[in-house]
Image (tube, grey):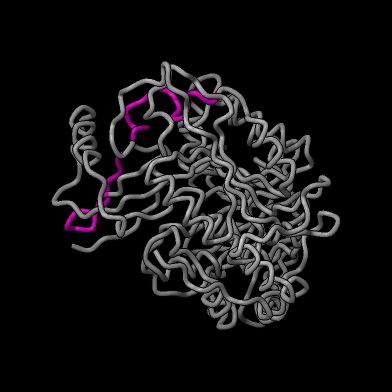
Amino acid sequence: MALQTLNPYRHAAAVSPAPSPVPHRGHPPPHAVLHLPPRRRLAGGAARPLAVAAAVSGAVNEARRRGVPQEGGEDGRKDTDLATLGNLCVDVVLSVPQLPPAQQEERKAYMERLAASPPDQKFWEAGGNCNLAFAAARLGLNCSTLGHVGEEIYGKFLLDVLQAEGISVVGMLENTNAAACRQAYETLLCWVLVDPFQKHGFCSRADFSQEPAFSWIRKLPADIRTAIHHSKILFCNGYAFDEFFPDVIASSIDCAICSGTAVFFDPGPRGKSLLHGTLGEQRALEHALRLSDVLLLTSDEAESLTNIRNPVQAGQELLKRGIRTKQVVIKMGSRGSIMITKNTISCAPAFKIDVVDTVGCGDSFTAAIAFGFLHDLPAVNTLTLANAVGAATATGCGAGRNVARLDKVLQLVREADLNEDVTLWTELTEGNSLRIEVSILSGMARNGFSENIVAVPVTKVVSELLPMFEAVPVRSAVQA
């Protein structure tokens, strides 16, 4: 039966590989994971255009592989481009005769039978925020993942995969609870199940718990605070609430703001449930929405948080509510994407591709938004790159190490075959209540759609994007 790697974001928390009911009373908890490949020096903390970095990138990557320390980070410089908070898990992708039953007790028993014996490693894949980190690293960004990884076989697998991609891991075991069950310290596992009709089901321990997966983490560890301080961007999504208490998430955002670190927040499908969740969840969600520098949502998610159907107007409403918000990015799948700022609305249609698997596309897309933010690219250029990275992922099968590689991204950018729908963009931007300038990426020569709409030639954008990447060595494929 065919296997397909699916998005672990459905359930960021997961089941343990083998139940371990023995508590830690009288036994020390596992040691904290601190797995840091060498850091790359960035002069003055500023992001370098990749064309400038190309001359040394090969040597840096080779040094990382050899474990040779690099300069930077010891004097307060921000030597990490992007740090992700939580959602580090291993997907176990299995073909099954039928999906698990809907009833909770039966699902739990089904999951425990799966966990009784670890499946072959060929069915494992890094999931969750690893997708974003992989895509960002392949664009040349220096990435770090902040979260908990256990010491069992799944944790070792995850660390090895991340290290092979040059991505560091900072663990979160400072605040351990001696009374916690050993299972609470194990690596998050997501059972991704595929039936003969290619329908998908998901099982994780988060399905059966009222508390976060890592409820023993009561405050933000010092190592995580240090890592945030050394990062230019902290990314968090709604699935972090499946792992951490709301106060821990809010503290990470506060730490980023105090450190001068930009905050990216993607509420995801969890946004709607958090909006109607506990008082703590509601407050932390509002905290993230108002204090983030960049918000990323699908059009449906934007509507669920604002009750406004038009994605441009919904984005403007979120921008208006925000205190620090600089960009609201709306992901529209095969139609493209929109970026709303205080003074501009920018739209970019998607690339025409043969879609194989959409899993991981949103994560890949976010990696390019981070790249554009750090390099201060024009909004249309950033969206074009993000659409290309998301599309490159969709042409492959599954997420994890199968997300977009730079050569495929550049191929799509060069071809510049856009899925243009002039009517769509005109209708969406006619709701522009502030009457600010609208820029739309176009593959056709136009004099402008209307008084406030400017067509940006895709040839111009391509000519500006390609030189940033063409000198950068393409990452070799990572073997599973």
Q: Residue furthest left?
A: 97
The image position of residue 351, as x and y in percent, is 51, 72
Number of marks in the rendered image: 0
Magenta span = 193-217
Q: Residue furthest right?
A: 44
> Is 225 colored magenta in this rendering?
no
Magenta residues: mostly which secondary structure? loop
The quadrant of the image that shows the N terminus is bottom left
- Which of 433 and 357 lies nearest the eye of the viewer? 357
* Quadrant where the C terminus is found in the figure: bottom left
Q: Is residue 249 left or right of residue 201?
A: right
Residue at figure coordinates x 46%, y 67% from the top left: 478
Q: In the displayed structure, would residue 133 be above or below residue 416?
A: above
Q: Where does the image place residue 336, in percent across and percent down from the top left?
A: 54, 63
Name the foreground residue: 48 vs 340: 48
Res 84 seen here: yes
Image location (x, y in percent) of residue 472: 66, 76
Rendering quarter of residue 113: top left
Q: Is residue 195 magenta?
A: yes
Q: Residue at point 20% right, 27% down? A: 105
As drawn, 21 above or below 147: above
In the rendered image, residue 343, in percent from the top left (x then y), is placed at: 78, 53
Task: Specify whether 1 is left or right of 326.
Answer: left
Residue 281 visible in this rendered orientation of the protein: no
Instruction: Give residue 197's quadrant in the image.
Output: bottom left
